[in-house]
Amino acid sequence: MTTETKTFYTAAFIVIGNEILSGRTHDVNIHYAANFLNQYGIDMMEARIIPDIEETIIKTVNELRQKFDYVFTSGGIGPTHDDITADSVAKAFNVSIDYRQDALDILKNYYGEANITHARNRMARIPQGAVLIENPVSGAPGFKIENVFVLAGVPKIQRAMLESLVHLLNKGMQIQTICYRLATVESKIASLLQETEQNYATVSIGSYPFTANDKFGVRVILRSRNAEDLNLAQQALEKQFLEKSIEFAIE
Amino acid sequence: MTTETKTFYTAAFIVIGNEILSGRTHDVNIHYAANFLNQYGIDMMEARIIPDIEETIIKTVNELRQKFDYVFTSGGIGPTHDDITADSVAKAFNVSIDYRQDALDILKNYYGEANITHARNRMARIPQGAVLIENPVSGAPGFKIENVFVLAGVPKIQRAMLESLVHLLNKGMQIQTICYRLATVESKIASLLQETEQNYATVSIGSYPFTANDKFGVRVILRSRNAEDLNLAQQALEKQFLEKSIEFAIE
């Protein structure tokens, strides 16, 4: 894991779940995590939705943990037969997985000793060397192994786990954003955006057409970690919007 | 591209867009496309959200088009500087990209000759050998090259393009689904689900906990292309639900 200080850190997010790929369930975790990590100067660089297939999980985790500072997995750590994330992550790291006393104690505390079943205890199986991530919502912990954070897929539980793990993350500089909503079409601002991006190298400019009430509009988003450049790019753009009589609003 | 008949076909879906990874925009295309493809017996096996980085687009397209019957890309085919999908896909296939007369004609028809700008014409740059995909919403076409379908990211446009390209797809057998909503917790049904899945090999069973009004529940989803097995698995499960006094409803 990276220990030196960086301006920003990178992350990948892996949703493990047939129910998302089948179109049954609409994932909301990627969007939430992207915004959550943003606050801490951690940029989500890639997200993947993969099926509950051990080999795919192992390959994906191993590819992404080499490429990015952090990897987050979402889903597949419950008590049923299709919850294979913990085992697959252990295999990805080539470590053993077994019942762990601190995790068993957490479950016993949460459910009460009389309600501990074989299936529930399965959630205390943790790969060797992992650090537990507290789950204040439903007891069963997530875990962190090296730079990989293994989280529950239920949104309410995952959000609580993200709060629990913040202290384990290195923090970067938060990216600054300006978002314009323009009453125009992309083709009318294409060259203007390109020039502005070329003039302010630290500023990235995205252009996103949308339809609302059957009218087309464009969202233009400036992003930078350099406040001065961002300010100059903003001034340059707004001067041009005025000159070209393009209506704009900042969102 | 696959030409023999199969029971089902596989697909990957690639969302190209910094705005999704930054948490600014919530992707809705993956979910829609998964359901759309389902109807035609095409299973989405993986979805990725990647940034507007040429190298990443090339690598991702080339990896996934080898692995799956179909690949769909979403976003980055507009007229602005950050629209680099068409060029990147051309590079992935190692073919040239240039203005194409049929695409120019479509744009001229849609916008009217007087409104054709340099930026708009950019949308008529099509990789060599590609087949155009009609866009009844906003003119500028998508395209298909081998087994890769390059679509607009604006949901309304993308949905129209999916309708336009259906005739280009091989169709498989649609998967059959039964979805139970149970007033129980996963740990109480874990062994039952596992046994049922083992007894009916063609049936895959997923178990998805949820919270609603602060109560926990479980959705159990049976999926199969074998109607007889699905029916037997359904009967076996419902018998057990009744025996164990587990309230269930079919959704």
Image: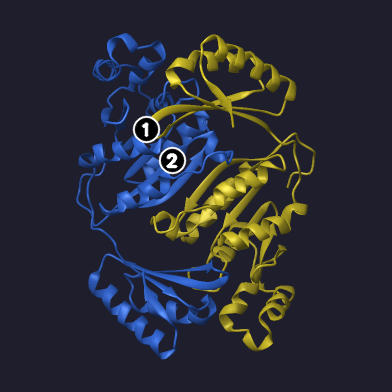
Chain colours: A blue, B yellow
Q: Do the dots labelled 2 and 1 sit on one chain?
A: no
What residue is rendered at 58% in x and 46% in y?
A: B64
Question: Which of B203/B235 is in front?
Answer: B235
Instruction: Categorize mark 2 by other alpha carbons within 10 Å: few (<14), some (14-19), many (20+).
Output: many
Q: Quadrant of the C terminus of chain A?
A: bottom left
Label 2 sits on what residue type?
A: Ile
Query: Would residue B248 be visible to someone looking at this image?
Result: yes
Parent chain of label 2: A
Q: Is mark 2 on a helix, strand or loop?
A: strand
What residue is rendered at 59% in x and 76% in y?
A: B122
Parent chain of label 1: B
Q: Mark 1 points at which residue?
A: B214
Question: Which of A171/B91 is in front?
Answer: A171
User: Percent x, y for residue B69?
Assistant: 68, 44
User: Percent x, y for residue B123?
Assistant: 61, 73
Quadrant of the rendered image containing residue B229: top right
What residue is rendered at 50% in x and 73% in y?
A: A217
User: Percent x, y for residue B251?
Assistant: 59, 32
Instruction: Categorize mark 1 by other alpha carbons within 10 Å: few (<14), some (14-19), many (20+).
Output: few
Kindly identify which numbered label has been placed on residue A165.
none
Query: Is residue A36 found left or right of B166 in the rendered image?
Result: left
Numbered marks: total: 2
User: Percent x, y for residue A97?
Assistant: 36, 19
Q: Name the residue under label 2.
A: A14
